[in-house]
Amino acid sequence: MKKPNQKGFALALMVVLLPVVLAAGLASYAAMTFLQIEQRFLYTCRSGGIDGQEKAGKQIDALLKLNPKATRLIAEEKSAKAALIAAEMSTNPYAIAKAEARLRYVQGKQEILNLRQKAIVMAGNSALQTAQQNTARKLGLLTSEITDYKSLFETSARIELKTAPRLAVSPEGADIAPTYRTDPDIEQRQALVHKWQYQLRVQRHLQGFISGDFKFKKSCAVTVTEKGSSWTPKILRDKF
């Protein structure tokens, strides 16, 4: 008997296995593509959020450092008001004028401090607003760049626009220049959040080897957390 033609058998085996090998290769490439896209989106989102929260955290630090001065001026104002009441009861014009001048002086210092406090809060809000807008813009640019994979996939992506948070601080009391505190839910309230979704669909000419329509909804968030006496960025792992 003649021996089987081993070359013919090998060729036939290759023909049979070729679709399987191609399918495995495409599946592997698809998985790598998903990972690369996801890493690019996450890096862009987190780096932008960290930069914004670093700047906002410094403003929180600066605001809270003014609290001792605010507390001292509040006490001085109360003392000046008490002195004015006492002077008015004495009906001494000189004493009254002196007490009134003292009260105006203290309240003037409070007005100046109040302007500093408001400027710090505005700077913090601006830092968060800028970070939110810049990161959204960069994520938008990435949505166009994922067409680099169009030789194998039909791609589409969309960024969900989110409103920027504000500095999560609140005044304590109604004084001219009050003390400030951070809000109890600051990590949630001040989080810079971004959401996006993208879709990959295998090109038609390759669907004989592998088929699939993959949709992903993703998000990332960066906030601030207290570390020692400072407020520093923190990546939130929870989904928003």
Image (spheres, grey):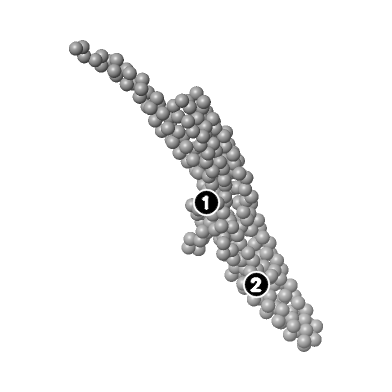
Return the residue nearer the eye: 204 or 187: 204
Horizontal side of 7 relative to 21 (left or right) equals left
Which residue is found at the position 57% from the left and 51% from the top? 192
Q: Secondary structure at mark 2?
A: helix
According to the picture, the residue beneath numbered tag 2 turns out to be: 73
Residue 61 in view (yes/no): yes
Q: Position of residue 34 (x, y in %)?
A: 47, 37
Residue 142 in view (yes/no): no
Quarter of the picture containing the N terminus is top left
Q: Residues within 10 Å of mark 2 (few under 14, many from 20)?
A: many
Return the residue nearer the eye: 233 or 102: 233
Label whose residue precedes the other's in the sequence (2 or 1): 2
Q: Residues within 10 Å of mark 1 (few under 14, many from 20)?
A: few
According to the picture, the residue beneath numbered tag 1 turns out to be: 239
Looking at numbered disc 1 in the image, what kind of residue is underneath it?
Lys
Q: Position of residue 213 (x, y in %)?
A: 51, 34
Q: Position of residue 154 (x, y in %)?
A: 54, 30
Image height of 204 relative to 235, above or below: above
Looking at numbered disc 2 in the image, what kind of residue is underneath it?
Leu
| Disc 2 from disc 1: Cα separation | 44 Å
Image height of 74 relative to 232, above or below: below
